[in-house]
Every structure is written in C-alpha cells, then in structure tokens.
Image (spheres, grey):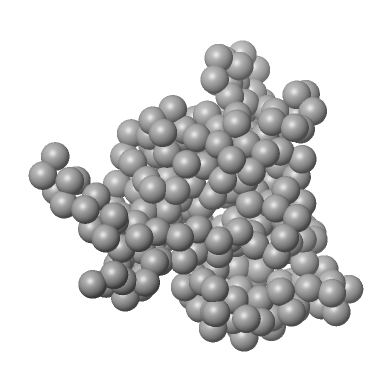
Amino acid sequence: MTRNPVRLAAVGDVHWHVERRRTFHHHFETIHEVADVLILPGDLTGSGLPEEARLFAEVLSEVRVPIVAVLGNHDMHTENTDEVVRILRGAGVHVLLGGGDGVTLRIGDVSVGLCGTKGFCGGFGARCLTPFGEHAIKTFIDETKTEAERIEYDLSRLQADLRVVVLHYSPVEDTVIGEPRELYPFLGSSLLCGPIDQLGADLVLHGHAHYGSENGMSDSGIPVRNVALPVLKRSYAIFEFSPEALMNNRIERRSA
C-alpha cells in the first residue's frame, strides 16, 4: 500500500513588522492543504520587537499544522529574545534554541525529528575563521563553536525516521553563492556542518543569505536548502519524503 508522502513547508526571513499584516497573513491560510509541518528558519521579525512577535504570533496561531522555528539575527537585534520566544511559544510554535529542545512529530506512520539553533558566522572551508589571536576573535568564533555543540547535542539524541536540522546561518558555502564574497564570513560557517555530517540528517534548512542560492549539499551529501523568502520568491518551499523510502533508511541505519 502506498502511503501519503511527508510534506514539509519552509520559509525564512519573513521579517515581520507591523505594516506587513495586510500583505502577508494570507500566505499561511491554506498551508495545511499542502504540508504537514511549517518550518521557519529565523528572522521571523523585523527587529526583534515584542509587538512584531505578537502580530506574527496571531497569524501563526491560526495555522493548522505544527510549526517549528529558530531565531535569526533580526530577532535578537533589540535584545528582547526571551520575550519573543515566550510570545511565539504561547502561540504553539516549537522554538528551537538548541542544547536539548529538539522535537519529534508523528506524521502518519513516520516520525519526523527536528532540531536546530540560530547558528553563527565564521566562513567556510579553508577560509573558516579560527580562534587565534585577539580575544575578540576568539570570542567571535567561540559563539559559532557553541552553536555547533548545540547541534551535536540535539542531533545525537534525535531518534526519528526523518531527521531535519533547522538553522538561520548557512552551514555550507553552496547556498551563499550569489552574495558578495566579502560577506561570506558573516553568512555562516563550516563549523556548523561538522556534527551534521558526522551524525547524519536527511535535510538541512536555513535562511539569512538573501542573495544566495537555494540548493546546496554538505560534504557527506546531505541536502542543504536556503529557504530565505527573497531567494525562494514564493510563499514557501515544499519538501516531500516517501514513507517507504524513510522506513527503508531506518532499517539500513539499524543494521549498520
């Protein structure tokens, strides 16, 4: 018997602000008809203001599928992070901060595990920043290392048929291509991808790179997708997974 596919909708960098309610709220009205989960990879608000979070939460509270989100740099700009998280969680959003808050959802016969965190900067590959020299540089890259450790912690504990990592910053260079090269170090870091390649996942989603590329891949072949709204140029991207294929993967993982 063929089962319905698991469908994930994802869009980042909505940058919700007070004036946007009239122009964007309808985008999620019928999402339950095309997706089983809505994923929001950061920059949910314009400046991290509680009022922005409340208005966006009103819209999200009417969405008829589970919602999973991480924060972005815009959501932290005015240092109201705790209040923004409280408001979003009050609307039923699973806000992932990393380090123990991964979530597993049941979609039909399939368990969908999601973990994630904001991520941070540092650059990619041989040009990735290292913690050497001035204290400020060490502090900067320590933030990225801490975020990578949060991913490792959650992903190592995520037992599910479908494993999805949600970030705001990119873990690979592929999906920032199109941005000015001078900005690459501030759009993500290869350090974020280390635990993902080591522990495995089926999909990685991020935003932040507004002029980047939609499709990328980690060193181990894991699909990485930049779902920033300016990149998608549509309300959201849809990702479908066959339950049969996921169950076969589960059997292979258990026998490995």
Q: Residue furthest right?
A: 19
Query: At which x and y percent is residue 183?
Result: 75, 29
**On screen, 213 above or below 104?**
above
Residue 79 visible? The answer is: no
The residue lying toward the viewer, choosing from 75 and 170, is 170
Q: Looking at the figure, which quarter contains the C terminus?
A: top left
Q: Where does the image place residue 49, in percent across and percent down from the top left?
A: 77, 67
Can the viewer see residue 33 in this picture?
Answer: yes
Residue 111 located left or right of residue 208: left
> Residue 33's image quarter?
bottom right
Horizontal side of 188 relative to 203 (left or right) equals right
> How far across and down, in percent of the image, does residue 11 sit?
64, 59
Report the side of 237 relative to 49 (left or right). Answer: left
Identify the residue shown where x is 33% and y is 34%. 198
| Snapshot quadrant of residue 14 | bottom right
- At horizontal 42% and vertical 45% (from top left) the residue drawn is 151
Location of residue 89 (image quadrant): bottom right
Residue 13 percent location from the top left of the image: 71, 56
**Residue positioned most to the left:** 255
Quadrant housing the N terminus: bottom left
* Residue at horizontal 49 percent and vertical 30 percent from the top: 191
- On screen, residue 105 above or below 129: below
